[in-house]
Image: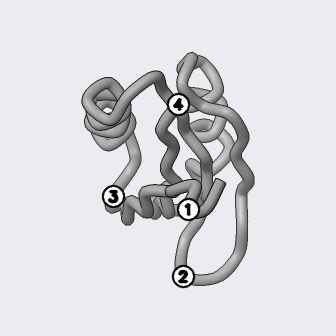
C-alpha cells in the first residue's frame, strides 16, 4: 500500500509559483496549492513505501527557495 504525507512549505517571498513548478516535476507529487496564511504551499506526496517517501521528502526540502517544511504523514486508519 502506498504511503503519503502532506507538506506545509514556507518559501522566500515571491518564489511561490517557481517552487510549485519545480515540485510538479517530481513524480511523487500528487497535488499542490499555493495558499495564504502561515505557509505558502501545501502539497501531498506519495510513494510505494515509507523509506522511499522519506527520500522524496528530503529531496523536496533541498529545493531552492524553500525555507522550512512541516511534514504530516497520512495514515489510512480503519480502511
- Label 2 close to label 3 by CB (< 8 Å): no
The residue at which mark 2 appears reads as 38
The Cα atoms of the two marked residues, 3 and 1, are separated by 32 Å
Q: With 62 as the anchor, is 25 left or right in this view? A: right
* Marks 4 and 2, the one that precedes in the sequence: 4
Mark number displayed over residue 2: 4
- Label 2 close to label 1 by CB (< 8 Å): no
Residue 60: x, y in percent? 38, 36
Residue 34: x, y in percent? 71, 57
Q: Is residue 12 at all visible to an observer of this figure? A: no
* Marks 3 and 4, the one that precedes in the sequence: 4
The residue at which mark 3 appears reads as 67
> Which element carries disc 4, helix, strand or loop?
loop
- Label 1 close to label 4 by CB (< 8 Å): no
Compared to 39, does 1 lie above or below? Answer: above
> Which element carries disc 1, helix, strand or loop?
loop
* Marks 2 and 3, the one that precedes in the sequence: 2
What is the total number of numbered labels drawn onto the structure image?
A: 4
The residue at which mark 1 appears reads as 77
**How busy is the neighbourhood of tag 4: few (under 14 within 10 Å), some, or many (20 plus)?**
few
The Cα atoms of the two marked residues, 1 and 4, are separated by 13 Å
The Cα atoms of the two marked residues, 3 and 4, are separated by 28 Å
Q: Residue furthest bottom?
A: 37
Compared to 65, does 41 lie above or below? Answer: below
Amino acid at each position: 500500500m502506498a504511503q503519503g504525507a502532506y507538506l506545509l512549505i514556507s518559501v522566500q517571498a515571491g518564489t511561490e509559483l517557481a517552487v510549485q513548478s519545480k515540485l510538479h516535476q517530481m513524480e511523487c507529487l500528487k497535488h499542490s496549492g499555493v495558499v495564504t496564511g502561515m505557509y505558502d504551499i501545501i502539497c501531498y506526496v506519495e510513494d510505494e513505501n515509507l523509506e522511499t517517501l522519506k527520500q522524496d521528502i528530503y529531496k523536496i526540502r533541498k529545493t531552492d527557495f524553500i525555507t522550512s517544511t512541516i511534514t504530516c504523514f497520512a495514515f489510512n486508519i480503519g480502511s
